[in-house]
Structures are given as C-alpha cells and as structure tokens.
Image: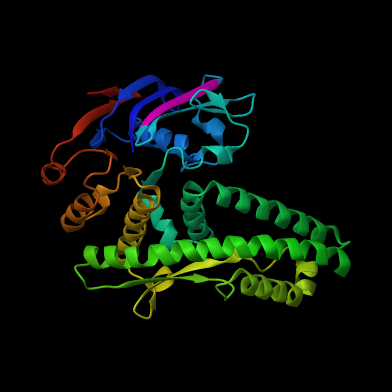
Amino acid sequence: MFVKSLEVTNFRNYKKQQLELSNGTHIFTGGNGMGKTNLLEAVYFSSIGRSPRTPRDKELILWDEDKARVNLISEKAAGDEKVEIVISRNENKRITINGLPISKIGELMGVINTVFFSPSELKIVQSSPGERRSFMDIALCQISKAYFYLLSRYGKILQQRNKLLKSGNATNDSLDIWDLQLAQIGAKVIKNRKGFLQSLAPLAKENHEFLSDGKESLVISYEGFSGERLEEIEAAFLKQLNLDRERDKKFGFTHAGPHRDDMLLRIGSVDIRTYGSQGQQRTTALSLKLSELKMFEEMRGESPVLLLDDVLSELDTTRQQKLLERVKGVQTLIACTHLESSVRDLVGAMCEYRVENGVVYN
C-alpha cells in the first residue's frame, strides 16, 4: 500500500497544497515551523481520524479559516481507496470513504494504515502506562475494526460505572450489574492486547538485537490480569473488582482493569521504562515501531506507510543506516530540517522537496 495523492486545504499553515507521490522514499526538508511535519500529520489524520500531535481538531484549521479539508488517495492491492476529511469550527467532523459518508470513526480504521514515529514517541517507553496502552490500542484498531468498537464499548461501561461511584449512590446490587459487563468486555480487550504483544514480542526482540548489534535482547510482556483464556481473565477481573469495591466507592473511580494495565519492557533484568539509558530507550522505541510496521505487513498482506518526523537527527549514523535498511520497500515520508550527505547516500533513490511557509517546492 502507498499514498499516491495528498491534497490539503486550510490545513495547519497550508492554504492549498497538492502532492503526487510514488511508492518510495519522500523527504521534506525545511526550517522549523515551515510545515513539513504538517504533511505527515495530514497522512496520519487520514488513517486514524485524529492528529498525533493534538486531540483538538480545530487546531488543525488555518487560523483565519472556518474549515479545513484533507483528501488522500492510496493504492492498495485491492484497488484505490479515497479518504476525505472535513473539519469545521462550527460543525462535526465529516469523513467520506470512496465518496460515501461514514457515521462512525471505526469505519475508517484499516483503510489507510500508517506507522508514525517522532522523537516524542520516546514517551512510549519513558512516560506513563497510558502512552503504552495507546501504542497497543492504535495499532490494534488499525488491524481490527472490531477491536475499535470493543474498546469504545469498554470505555462507555467504565464511564457509567465511575459515574455511579461518584454519585455516592452505588449499592452492591447496582455495582454487580456494571461489574459483570465491565469484566466481560474488559477480558476481551485484555486478550486482544496479549495476543498483539505475543506477535509483537519476537519481532521487537529481533529488531532490537539488529539495532544494538546483538548486544541487547528486548523482552516484552503484558502487565495485567493473568490467564490466557477469556474465562480466566474475566474471573480474575471480577475478583479484583470485588476486592476493590469499597476503595472504588471511597475514591469514586475504578482502580482495576485494562484502563490501568501496562506493557513491560525489559533488557535482561532491567526495566527499561524506569532504569534504561536514553540510548536504550530510544532503541527500544525504534524497535517497537519497526515491529509494528512488520506486523501490519504480515497481518494485512501489504506494508503500511511509514512517517518519520525528525527522527534521523536523533540517531547516530549506524542506527540511521540500520533503520533505512529495515524500511526498504516501504513508502516512507521523512520530515527533517536538512539532509546530511551521509543520509542521502543511505537513502539512495528518493524524491526530495523543500517546504517554506506552507508551500512545497519540488
């Protein structure tokens, strides 16, 4: 799969820009604030329906305009796919796929698959468990629309249970009803995440060893309720909800569940999340992203689009070489301030663009 056409109108600092792309490497250079990252953001936005940089869609609209539009056409084995998203300051976001409007964002999942990586993605390793849950969930939503709706259903049940807890009117009978639903849906979320990590772990181990010249071996596992079968996970969840019931009532929220789980990252006996060096954490984040890329390829039968936002400047020459070697054959869009001659040699054939004040020059 690759993006063959991208058109943005009143998006970020772009008044109007149209690009025709090929299935190869495209590099966008320019100073800070010129708009090169905004192009990668537009591609990701067409894939996920939200920005990797802000949860507020209105921030994507050119400051003196009422609406912004993104049009993207991708070429896939089964044929072209066209996604159009219109954002308005006064109306709800509108999305069409191949000219047909969709009513649920879940219908967008998997139409355009992307893997986004920027220096801020180090937060997958360094930051709170929520960042690692988000990494798992975004990947799983692109792989499976069913998982997107499952996760959405869990969130709604959790919201209702917490609302009841905060009201001060929670009884054992009323909580029993919500607990059963939460455990049933939550167990499915956990099982999906565990399955994802079981597939990701060997790929991440191999990628990490490749990036570290065999000096380090990355181990990934899920931190949450034990059990592999749904029945086991559900039983463990229900048991913990019962144990936490009085505490949940006291504080007004649910302490246990997949909304609190984590992904454990270890090199040997060292927990990289807390005790890893910056170099180890950077390599781990890169390993996770490369493994996500490979998983999409294996599970969907074609490569996603790789979006690299100012990543090369964060890597030494050896890791730059290894990264670019790993992504051969994948459409890769790279945003950077400038292109070192050493990187230019590593990339080989490419299309290069200069971005200045929201205009792309070829």
Examine the residues drawn in magenta and state their main secondary structure.
Answer: strand
Residue 81 in picture, x, y percent from top left: 42, 30
Q: Which residues are magenta?
A: 67-74
* Vertical position of residue 319 compared to residue 256: above or below: above
Residue 200 in picture, x, y percent from top left: 39, 62
Q: Is residue 362 left or right of residue 309?
A: left
Residue depicted at 42% across the width and 33% down the height: 42
Residue depicted at 82% across the width and 58% down the height: 164
The answer to whether residue 169 shows anywhere in this view is yes
- The count of marks equals 0
The answer to whether residue 62 shows anywhere in this view is no
Residue extending farthest bottom:
269
Residue 304 in picture, x, y percent from top left: 35, 44
**Residue 255 falls in which quadrant of the image?**
bottom right
Q: Which is more toward the observer, 235 or 139?
A: 235
* Vertical position of residue 181 compared to residue 9: above or below: below
Q: Which is more toward the observer, 73 or 134?
A: 73
Name the image quarter holding the C terminus: top left
Q: Is residue 332 left or right of residue 181?
A: left
* Vertical position of residue 249 compared to residue 67: above or below: below
Name the image quarter holding the N terminus: top left
Q: Is residue 292 left or right of residue 60?
A: left
Q: Is residue 280 left or right of residue 82?
A: left
Image colouring: rainbow
Q: Which is more toward the observer, 243 or 301?
A: 301
Residue 33 in picture, x, y percent from top left: 36, 33
Q: Is residue 72 highlighted in magenta? A: yes
Q: Is residue 83 highlighted in magenta? A: no
Residue depicted at 29% across the width and 48% down the height: 311
